Image (cartoon, helix red, strand yellow):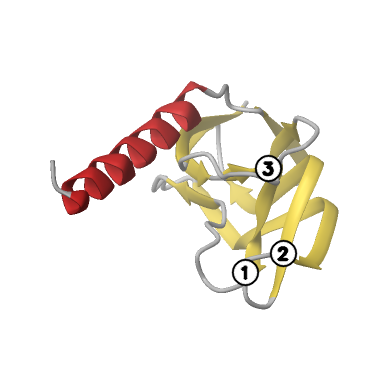
């Protein structure tokens, strides 16, 4: 076997094994969903994240060199729902420099809330999907998608 083939084989095994290892790690995130009525037809749709110690999730505006995958929240169209502004985040924010990343990065650890303000008329279900990526100090897990449902009674 030539040296080039041996190097190629080694790299292929290394990449495959690291992807397989990251697939075996259990998602360190617990997501819950809450509707909070503010008055009249005004509501807050709150996505609660509880992330295990040692892990972080990038901010909605993560900074860095552009490779950090920020969480996204996509709401399905619903004639009874008018979203007001964008999703905001609240939690234990860290802004820091990380090895191997240019510029400052912003991320959250522990408990984080994502809040969407909405005007809702009538009983309805608000559905959609959110995408996210979590990392620790050694690696990032592949991005994940989760469906969500908010019930307005």
Residue 41 versus residue 49 in the image, above or below = below
Horizontally, residue 78 falls left or right of residue 107, namely left
* Residue that mark 1 sits on: 101
Pick the residue in front: 121 or 67: 67
Cα–Cα span, label 3 and label 2: 12 Å
The numbered dot on residue 79 is none
Residue 82 versus residue 104 in the image, above or below = above
Q: Position of residue 48 (x, y in %)?
A: 72, 36
Furthest-right residue in view? Answer: 92
Horizontally, residue 133 falls left or right of residue 88, namely left
Pick the residue in front: 136 or 71: 136
Query: Which residue: 63% across, 52% down?
Result: 118
First reached walking from the N terminus: tag 3 or tag 1: 1
First reached walking from the N terminus: tag 3 or tag 2: 2
Pick the residue in front: 105 or 59: 105
Query: Which residue: 72% across, 39% down?
Result: 55
Q: Position of residue 4 (x, y in %)?
A: 19, 53
Furthest-left residue in view? Answer: 1
Q: Quadrant of the N terminus?
A: top left
Q: Secondary structure at mark 1?
A: loop
Query: Which residue: 68% across, 78% down?
Result: 103
* Residue that mark 3 sits on: 136
Query: Which residue: 52% across, 71% down?
Result: 66
The numbered dot on residue 98 is 2
Q: Secondary structure at mark 2?
A: loop
* Circles 2, 1 touching at the beta carbon (< 8 Å): yes
Q: Position of residue 37 (x, y in %)?
A: 76, 39
């Amino acid at each position: 076997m030539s040296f080039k083939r041996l190097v190629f084989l080694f790299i292929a095994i290394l990449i495959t094994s690291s992807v397989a290892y990251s697939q075996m790690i259990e998602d360190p995130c617990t997501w819950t969903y809450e509707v909070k009525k503010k008055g009249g037809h005004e509501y807050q749709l709150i996505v609660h994240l509880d992330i295990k110690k040692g892990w972080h999730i990038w901010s909605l505006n993560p900074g860095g060199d552009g490779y950090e995958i920020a969480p996204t929240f996509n709401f399905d169209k619903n004639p009874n729902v008018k979203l007001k502004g964008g999703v905001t985040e609240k939690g234990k924010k860290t802004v820091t420099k990380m090895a191997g990343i240019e510029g400052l990065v912003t991320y959250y650890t522990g408990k984080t809330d994502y809040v969407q303000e909405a005007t809702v008329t009538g009983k309805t279900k608000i559905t959609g999907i959110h995408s996210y990526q979590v990392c620790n100090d050694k690696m990032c897990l592949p991005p994940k998608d989760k469906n969500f449902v908010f019930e307005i009674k």
